[in-house]
Image: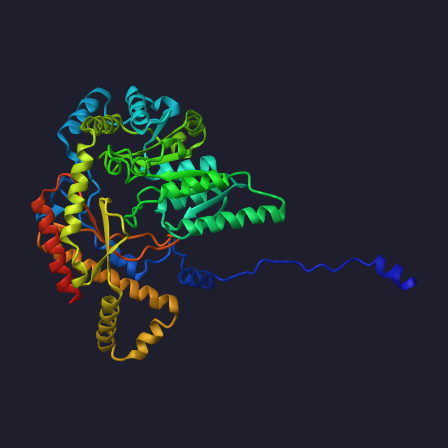
């Protein structure tokens, strides 16, 4: 007890924490040796290479384009499907609006950024899409990226097609919902996930507040159409809501160009949230969402891309409205002309497999057509390239050390495949035809396989299509042997 009392009254010993005193020379040495971390990751070999492949146009994206180097080419790369980007009527509408309203709106829609041209365009869109109302965004990317998180929240479930574009993936991520992906355009896999979800709900005695199925109408990365009839049938059985982006389908699919719903004979009301970009068939900028009045009103207060972004410039809105008027007035003639030219191109390229290219997807009505290198041809070319690289690098040991990891081997093979496709694109450009090799950001959830993309427009003549098919065959044979 005496010892305890003695220790109790002893002062505790504290270590004085004095800052380390450095000399001036030591400080200078540390400053010289310090290297700040880079603000962004260093570019990979593929990113550096992709950045060097851009083409600069000095003309409108019409059927004949002029490049920055002064050369001319027939344009099979732009998504100006109906020729609206440089149509005389849409240009005149834009010029008239520019003279009346000026260049920009200089404010979001809720803060003095709304003009009568915006209201007129939304009314025209709602009428064209056979919906109660429509809402327009100033950015096509932000349209679907804002619409999805405006409805799907933390406690909801999103079942998303694995083949959707990056803007949809961004919207799905921003929603903070639970996300499950099903195989691209595989209704059986979608049904399996829905059935498993229903079983889990019963076992856990708890279900998500809402379930959304997110798809594209016409898939930009694949050129095929969603099986909308089967998905709507599942909706009536499993009780979920459909969010569909139909950016490439509006104006191109269906008898009168009203998109994937008209293509399959499905009423627009079966789609709960229907979005689309106006930068393709309408030849303008921005996007829109069409649907029920409550769906549209909710976005005016809750969609970040609408609330916080300046509204579309009035001249672009006027141009889009005029494009809609022209599509409606044609009563399906534009779409028939487009589909006839798509069919002609398919007829001219049926024997592409003889030169090593094959068609991706089975849709014969899509104006976006992807070609891939056939596997047996690709394997042979990759082996040939590896052998050539071994000689350059003086031995296989160095290559094995550099590409020892499996993912690095895949990255190397993908880069080689993309370079083969780019060689076809470059050779075609020398012969006056502009094709496109799509590139993707590395943040893609499911990276599409490399491909060569061809887009068909009503402004193409039969001579243009014959030339494009012949050049594609010749250049593929030249590059792939």
Residue 304 located left or right of residue 325: right
Which residue occupies the extreme right position in the image? 1
**What quarter of the picture does the C terminus occupy?**
bottom left
Residue 280 quadrant: top left
**What quarter of the picture does the N terminus occupy?**
bottom right
Q: Which x, y percent locates residue 342? A: 18, 45
- Residue at left offset 18%, top offset 34%: 334
Q: Is 226 drawn above or below residue 469 in the view shown?
A: above
Q: Which x, y percent locates residue 87? A: 15, 32
- Residue at left offset 53%, top offset 50%: 196
Asked whether residue 67 is in view, the answer is no
Q: Which x, y percent locates residue 137? A: 34, 32
Residue 328 located left or right of residue 153: left
- Residue at left offset 92%, top offset 62%: 2
Q: Is 238 drawn above or below residue 362 in the view shown?
A: above
Q: Which x, y percent locates residue 253? A: 26, 38
């Amino acid at each position: 007890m005496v010892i305890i009392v003695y220790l109790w009254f002893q002062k505790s010993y504290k270590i004085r924490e004095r800052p380390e005193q450095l000399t001036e020379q030591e400080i200078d040495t540390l400053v010289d040796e310090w290297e700040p971390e880079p603000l962004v990751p260093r570019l990979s070999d593929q990113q550096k290479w992709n950045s060097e492949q851009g083409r600069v146009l000095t003309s409108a994206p019409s059927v004949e384009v002029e490049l920055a180097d002064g050369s001319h080419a027939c344009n099979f790369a732009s998504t100006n499907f109906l020729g609206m980007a440089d149509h005389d009527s849409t240009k005149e509408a834009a010029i008239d609006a520019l003279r009346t309203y000026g260049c920009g709106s200089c404010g979001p829609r809720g803060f003095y950024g709304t003009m009568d041209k915006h209201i007129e365009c939304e009314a025209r869109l709602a009428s064209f899409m056979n919906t109660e109302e429509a809402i327009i965004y100033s950015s096509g990317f932000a349209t679907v990226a804002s619409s999805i998180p405006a409805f799907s929240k933390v406690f909801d479930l999103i079942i998303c097609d694995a083949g959707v574009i990056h803007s949809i993936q961004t919207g799905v991520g921003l929603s903070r919902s639970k996300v499950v992906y099903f195989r691209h355009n595989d209704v059986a896999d979608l049904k399996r996930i829905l059935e498993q979800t229903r079983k889990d709900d019963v076992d856990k005695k708890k279900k998500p507040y809402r379930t959304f199925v997110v798809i594209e109408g016409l898939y930009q990365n694949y050129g095929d159409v969603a099986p909308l009839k089967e998905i709507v049938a599942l909706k009536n059985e499993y009780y979920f809501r459909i969010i569909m982006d139909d950016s490439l389908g509006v104006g191109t699919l269906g008898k009168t160009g009203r998109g994937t719903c008209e293509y399959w004979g499905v009423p627009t009301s079966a789609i709960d949230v229907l979005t689309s970009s106006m930068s393709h068939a309408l030849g303008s900028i921005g996007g829109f969402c069409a649907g029920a009045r409550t769906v549209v009103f909710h976005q005016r207060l809750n969609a970040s891309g609408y609330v916080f972004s300046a509204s579309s410039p009035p001249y672009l809105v006027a141009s889009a409205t005029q494009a809609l008027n022209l599509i409606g007035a044609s009563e399906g003639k534009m779409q028939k002309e487009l589909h006839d030219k798509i069919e002609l191109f398919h007829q001219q390229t049926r024997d592409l497999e003889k030169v090593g290219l094959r068609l991706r997807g089975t849709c014969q009505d899509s104006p976006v057509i992807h070609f891939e290198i056939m596997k047996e041809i690709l394997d042979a070319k990759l082996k040939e390239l590896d052998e050539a690289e071994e000689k350059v690098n003086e031995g296989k040991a160095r290559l094995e050390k550099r590409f020892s990891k499996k993912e690095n081997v895949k990255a190397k093979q993908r880069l080689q495949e993309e370079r083969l496709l780019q060689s076809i694109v470059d050779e075609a450009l020398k012969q006056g035809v502009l094709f496109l090799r799509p590139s993707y950001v590395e943040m893609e959830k499911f990276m599409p396989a490399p491909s060569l993309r061809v887009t068909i427009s009503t402004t193409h003549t039969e001579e243009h299509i014959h030339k494009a098919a012949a050049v594609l065959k010749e250049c593929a044979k030249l590059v792939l042997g």
